Image: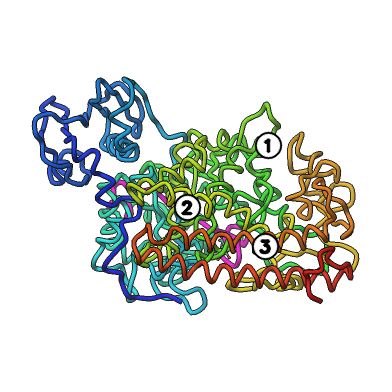
Amino acid sequence: MTTTLHATDVHPAWLPDAAFEPVARRGAVLVVPDGAARAGVDTDEVLDALGAEIDALGPYDGEPALLLELSGGGPVEGEESFRLRRERGRLTVTAGSSRGLLHGFFHVVRLGDAAFTGPDADESHAPAAALRMLDHWDNVDVHPVMGQVERGYAGGSIFYADGRVREDLSRVRAYARLLAAVGIDRVAINNVNVHAREARLLTDDLGEVARIAAAFRPYGVRVHLSVSFAAPMTVGGLETSDPLDEDVRAWWRAAADRVWEAIPDFGGFVVKADSEGQPGPFAYGRDHADGANMLAEAVAPHGGLVHWRAFVYDHTQDWRDRSTDRARAAYDHFAPLDGRFAAEVVLQVKHGPLDFQVREPVSPVLAAMPATRLALELQVTQEYTGQQKHAVYLGTAWSEVLRWRPWGDAGASVADVVAGAGGFAAVSNVGDDRFWTGHPLAQANLYAYGRLAWDPALDPVDILDEWIDLTFPGAPDALRAGLHLILDDSWRTYELYTAPLGVGFMVRPGHHYGPDVDGYEYTPWGTYHFADRDGVGVDRTRATGTGYTGQYPEPWRDVYESLETCPDELLLFFHHVPYTHVLHSGTTVIQHVYDSRFEGVERVERMVRTWESVADLVPVDVAVRVRERLAEQLRSATEWRDQVSTYFLRKSGIPDEHGRTIY
Ligand code: GCV
C-alpha cells in the first residue's frame, strides 16, 4: 500500500519551467526597501532579499517588464496582500512582505503572457481568509492497518521514511513551492490520529520538525503539528490530562515554549479529541471549550493557533437505535459552546455533518457559531470519492458548499462565514508518488483547493483552465476541450454511479473503496441507509425523525423538512421514502437508482474515449498513468452500478423499466 521508495524524477505539476517563460522572456527586477533596484533577478538574490526562492527569471537586458517591489509598509495593508500595476505592458508588483511579493509573483506567473498584454490597471489583491491550511494524515512509521499516510493514495509520506524525518527534504521544498503558487500558507505535517511514534514529534524530534519548517519557510508556509490530548500523560509522564489541572496546563505551556524556541514561526496545534478513539476532555467531565482553551493559553504568548476539530460523534452506536443520529453530533456538541472559545482557537468543521461523502448537506455548525473562529474542513484526498483511481474534480463540489447561503438568498454564504480571521483546512492528497497525487488529474484538486481558499468566488471551471494552462503549457484546444469534458462534471458522474440521492456510504468498510451496500448497515459507525422492501433513506425530520433538520436556520430547516421542497439530490439524506416516491425530476426513486447508475457508467465510458482522443497531446507518462486509472474507474463504476441496482431490485421487487438491471 505504501512505499518507502522516493520518486527521484518528480513531475513538475503546475510549475514546469515553461510556466515561467512569459516572465523570464521579458525579464524582472527586484526592488528592495532602500530603493536600489537589482537587475537580472536570480534565485540566490531573491532568496537573500525576500527570504523566498523564485526561479531564475532569465537574462536582464535592461528593459525588464516586471518589477517586484518590496515596500516597507507600502500602499497595501496586510502581510499577504499585494498591489499589481500595469502601465504600457510593464508590471509592478508591490507588497509589504516577502509573502505578499511571492503571492504577487505567482499571480503574474499564473496569468502568463496575458499579465503583460492587458490594458493599464491598478489592482489590490488579498486572500479572503487568513488561514489556508493543508493537513497531512502522515504517520512517521508505517501503521499496520492505515499504512504510512492514512487515507493516502499517492504512495508514502514526503516527510518521513524509515521511521524518521527524511534526510533529504528537497521534495518538501518543491511541495512548498507548489503550495506557495496557489496561496496555501500552513501545513500540518502529521496525522490527527496521533500514535506513540508521532507524539514524539512534539518532544524528542523538535529539531527534525524544525528542519521541515525550514524547508517550507522560504515559501511563506508555516508548519503545524497534530498533538494528542493525552500527551501530558503519554509523553509527559503525568497522571492526568485534565484540562483544568494546573500541572497539565503547565506541561502544555512548557511544551509550547519549547516548540516556539525551536521554530519561531511555528503555526500551532491541530487536535482531534474525543473522536474515533482519540483521547479528549470528556474523560474528565470537561467540555471541548475547556480542552481547547487550555491549549490556547499555551500558544497565546507565541501568537500561535489551536485548530480544534468539530468531528466528534459516537462511533460505538447501536444500529438498532434509530433515534441516535451521527449527523446531529457536531452541532449538539459544539453549538452550545459558541462564544466560549479563546481567540486563538479555530474550530475546524467538516463541510458536511457526516464524513466527506460525495453529496451531503452543508454542516449546520457553520451557521450556528457566530462568536467562534471557524475553518471549513475539506478533503482533497479522495477517501470517499474514488481514491485517486477515479477522475473526480472536486472544485465544483467545494464551490457549491462555499456559495451556499445558510440563511437564504439574502444572507451570508459559507465563504463569508469563514472569511477574515477564519479560513480553510483540507486533507492533502499528496504523497511521494512521482505525480504527487497518484492520478495526474488529481493534481487539479490540490490546485483548486488553494485557489478557492484564496478566492472562494472563483469559478471552478475557470480554475481548471488556469491549471491546464500551467500544467500543460501551450495546450492545444483539443486537449483543453478534452480535459474539460473529462473533469468539469466528473464529481456529478461519480455521484451518479455510487450511493444515490445523498444517502451516503455504501462503501466497503475499512478501506472505503468500491461498493458494499450493506457494508456499514449493521455496524457501530452510525452510517445507515435503512433500505427495506418498501423504501430507503434516513428520516431526519423534526416531525417523525431524528430532528436534524431543526439544526438549520430558516429557510433551510423547512426546505429540508418537507418532501415537497427537499432537493432531489439530498432526498434520502433527509427522508425515508417508498421506492415509488416521485422525484422533482418526474421519475420514481427506484427508477432513478437504475437510470443514474447506468448513466454514470456511460459517462465514464465517454471519459475513456475522450482520453484516448487526446492522450497523444500529453507526455507519454501522463497518458499511460491516466489510461490505467480510467480503466480501473470504468471497472469500479460498473461494479457500483451492478451492485447498487441489483441490491435495490432485489429489495423492492420493482423491475427496471428498461430491463437493464439483473436480478
Ligand atoms: C484521520 C474518517 C476517516 C479517518 C479519519 C477521520 C477524521 O473517519 O475514515 O481515517 O481519521 O475521518 O477525519 O479524523
Residue pictured at 87% horizontal, 68% vertical: 652
**What residue lies at 10% left-to-right and 27% top-to-bottom?**
36
Mark 2 burial class by Cα count in 10 Å: few <14, some 14-19, many 20+: some
Q: Quadrant of residue 607?
A: bottom right
560 or 314: nearer the viewer: 560
Q: Which residues are magenta?
A: 258-283
Q: Classify the position of ligand 1 by quadrant: top left, top right, bottom left or bottom right.
A: bottom right
- Identify which amino acid the numbered label 1 is placed on: Pro
Secondary structure beneath label 1:
loop
Measure how far apart labels 3 and 1 are at the Cα level.
28 Å
Q: Nearer the viewer, residue 534 or 494?
A: 494
Residue 497: numbered disc? 3
Q: CA distance from mark 3 to mark 2?
A: 21 Å
Label ID, residue 406: 1
Q: Which mark is residue 341?
A: none
Q: Residues within 10 Å of mark 3 (few under 14, many from 20)?
A: many
Residue denoted by label 2: 483
Q: Earlier in the sequence, mark 1 or mark 2?
A: 1
